[in-house]
Image: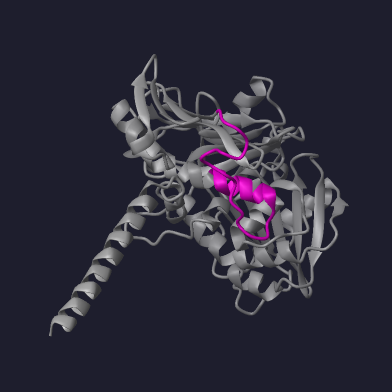
Amino acid sequence: MGHNRRIWTVELLKDVLIILLTISALWLAAQTPLVTPLRGLLREEGRQTAPGQVQGDSRSSGALPMAMVANIPVGAGLPDSFSVPEGTEGIRCGLQYDQAACQELFQQVAGSLVEALSSAGEPERIGRQQWESALTSSLGVYMDFQGQIPMPVLAGWLSGGDTPLTATVRRLVLTVWEDGVDLYYRDEKSGNYYRCRSEVADPFSLAGALSGLTDNGAFYAFESDYYRELDPDTLLFSQMPAPAVYTAANPMSAGQETLRALVQDLGFSLNSTSFYSTDEQVARSGDDSVRLSDRGVAQYQYEGREGGGLFPVLSQGEAGTLFDSVETCRQIALSAMGTRCGEARLYLMSTQATQQGWEIDFGYSLNGIPVLTESGRAARFVVEGGEVVQFSLYLRSYTNNGAASLVLPPRQGAAALSARGLSGEELLLTYTEAGGDTLTAGWSARDNRQGEG
């Protein structure tokens, strides 16, 4: 009996030791900087859908267009499932300043886009007339991402895979042709237009995704003499837009308390982080620091040796190093901004190569309408030597207050641009963020004519 009791005691001690080791491991994991930022993988860029609706995948949502147009012309070899009203030239269904509607249509055509990107043939340079024909005369869908997205990043967000295309795009078109799909796009760096043919992408899937849509009178500026002074690809509608009014707030107004929560979301270990105040609130952990201004601007800086920072660029798969850098920055932005920006969403504005790496900018949008902040962006990241060494975040929270913005009719907005000498620029709605507590939408001009525009 004594022998059995000793065995029982030894086993009990083993169990206690295992439990203690497990608790210790969990405690250490909780203090590890990489744990918290990875929570961003499970977050959307702010509120993406109405309460109660299912949110999209956090990776593919980075590629959600802000405007789309389905073009279904008569005589384009339409499947039997299509019903085009008699006496019309076809159906043109445009979606703009309606994030939920764009997301719904994009989910229908995303598979075709993935197939076209992964199997695209050699790009063929085309002229402006061929581009306009793709927009208006072919069965297909136009997508406008607002920001400038490198093709490898777009492919990586959609599928985790790669693409042979290297251009940076904002606007692209998928059209049906015989046994395949054509991909048209404008290279934002050069301003040139290209077409790629995919014999792998299924034209019937693309056509089927566009069935059931109804015409809503969407048109492009190049189709109307009234808008000849605008960027020809400006998307317009016969009906007046009624964008919401938003209340804006600084979610970091509580100072050190909110800074503590922010750096914890970023992955700082609070046990090794010191907090102090100068003209700003400061958090420092070793060579990593975050400074928070009273305007809600957070600035991160790594001042140590290469390879020792808190935010290494993590490999995401086959899409390549640029995609890895963009996706790592997006995850950081989500960790810091995803639960603080209210009804806004983040979108990729641009990527710029530097001698050491990349500068990567993200912007805010509200229901598909860009927000122009004081700096022009919501976040900027600097990637050098395979890690994020610096970033700045403009932290704001936006809430729909139930009112509608009073917006000039598009023709008057276009006339105002022309009167100010802004002919040739795109007319689009924007919100201007100047630090106030109310945002109303209004017409702005954007110059898309230059390669970097």
Can you say whether 196 is above or below 304 in the image? below
Q: Which of 262 and 68 is in front in this view?
A: 262
Q: Which of 179 and 263 is in front in this view?
A: 263
Question: Which quarter of the picture shows residue 377?
Answer: top right
Characterize the magenta stretch by its predominant secondary structure: loop
Q: Nearer the viewer, residue 19 or 251?
A: 19
Could one spot residue 13 in this view of the protein? yes
* Image location of residue 281, percent across then percent down: 37, 22
Location of the N terminus by quadrant is: bottom left
At horizontal 17% and vertical 83% (from top left) the residue drawn is 4
Can you say whether 47 is above or below 107 in the image? above
Per the image, is 317 magenta? Answer: yes
At horizontal 36% and vertical 54% (from top left) the residue drawn is 50
Q: Is residue 350 left or right of residue 213?
A: right
Q: In this view, does 385 lie to the left or right of 65?
A: right
Q: Nearer the viewer, residue 24 or 123?
A: 24
Could one spot residue 85 in this view of the protein? no
Can you say whether 153 is above or below 393 in the image? below
Q: The magenta stretch spans which residues? A: 303-329
Q: How many marks?
A: 0
* Image location of residue 208, percent across then percent down: 61, 73
At horizontal 61% and vertical 63% (from top left) the residue drawn is 159
Can you say whether 376 is above or below 42 in the image? above
At horizontal 39% and vertical 62% (from top left) the residue drawn is 54
Question: Which quarter of the picture shows residue 400?
Answer: top left
